[in-house]
């Protein structure tokens, strides 16, 4: 960033790297007040006022940065708690916690029949859910994010039906 300009607004400069050819935007850090997407990166550190962002899933599921077993994964996933994301219609309650079948479905997608899962393996499989793969992503690491629909469809859920 040019110190004369100040903080990056992600679109004002004529040669802005975050501006898409069609006029849309891509984001370097995926943070929001209400969950909108699943970031498909493990960590982004820009060394400027944007700071460092580590997605909640990455820090919760892989607290030491190494691989986890199915049992560790299930325990960490259940510990995340529920926050209604932006995107699905209707509402879903978290009464009674997450069903084990949900953890099983996510593990099957991310790890297959493996005994362990690495952070890099999880990122790669999450990126495989992206319908618009954006091969390079914002910083050359593959698709940067998923929206609710992509995540649900990959896991075999029916995201287009009303959830009550």
Image: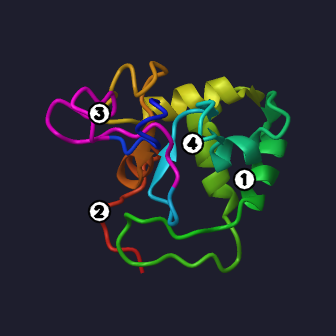
Queried whether the magenta region covers residue 122, the answer comes back as no
Q: Is residue 75 above or below residue 121?
A: below
Q: Work out how far the residue at label 3 is from the one at label 1, CA to CA, in angstroms.
A: 26 Å
Q: Work out how far the residue at label 1 is from the one at label 2, CA to CA, in angstroms.
A: 24 Å
Q: Can you identify the residue that label 4 sits on? A: 50
Magenta span main SS? loop
Q: Residue at x 75, y 48 (%)?
A: 60
Instruction: Single out the mark in the foreground, 4 or 2.
Output: 4
Q: Residue at x 29, y 33 (%)?
A: 132
Q: Can you identify the residue that label 1 sits on? A: 77
Q: Can you identify the residue that label 3 sits on? A: 132
Which quadrant would residue 16 be assigned to in this image? top left
Q: Is residue 38 left or right of residue 95?
A: left
Q: Is residue 49 above or below residue 88?
A: above
From the top left corner, tell me how far across and down residue 13 is, in percent.
27, 34
Q: Earlier in the sequence, mark 1 or mark 2?
A: 1
From the top left corner, tell me how far across and down residue 73 is, in percent.
77, 44
Instruction: Single out the mark in the foreground, 1 or 2.
Output: 1
Q: Is residue 61 left or right of residue 46?
A: right
> Is label 3 in a helix, a strand or a loop?
loop
Q: Residues within 10 Å of mark 1 (few under 14, many from 20)?
A: some
| Magenta stretch in the rendered image | 11-31
> Is label 1 in a helix, a strand or a loop?
helix
Q: Can you identify the residue that label 2 sits on? A: 160
Q: Residues within 10 Å of mark 2 (few under 14, many from 20)?
A: few
Q: Earlier in the sequence, mark 3 or mark 2?
A: 3
> Is label 2 in a helix, a strand or a loop?
loop
The residue lying toward the viewer, choosing from 117 and 108, is 117
Q: Residues within 10 Å of mark 4 (few under 14, many from 20)?
A: few
Q: Residue at x 42, y 48 (%)?
A: 156
């Amino acid at each position: 960033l040019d110190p004369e300009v100040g903080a990056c607004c992600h679109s004002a400069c004529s040669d802005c790297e975050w501006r898409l050819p069609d006029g849309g935007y891509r984001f370097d850090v995926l943070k929001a007040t209400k969950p909108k997407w699943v970031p498909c990166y493990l960590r982004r550190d820009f060394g400027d006022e944007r700071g460092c962002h580590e997605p909640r899933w990455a820090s919760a599921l892989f607290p030491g940065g190494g691989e986890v077993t199915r049992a560790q994964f299930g325990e960490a996933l259940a510990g995340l708690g529920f926050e209604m994301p932006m995107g699905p219609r209707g509402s879903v309650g978290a009464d009674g916690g997450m069903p084990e079948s949900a953890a099983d479905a996510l593990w099957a997608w991310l790890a297959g029949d493996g005994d362990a899962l690495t952070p890099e393996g999880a990122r790669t499989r999450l990126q495989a859910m992206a319908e618009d793969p954006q091969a390079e992503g914002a910083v050359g690491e593959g698709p940067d994010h998923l929206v609710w629909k992509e995540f649900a469809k990959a896991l075999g859920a029916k995201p287009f039906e009303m959830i009550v």
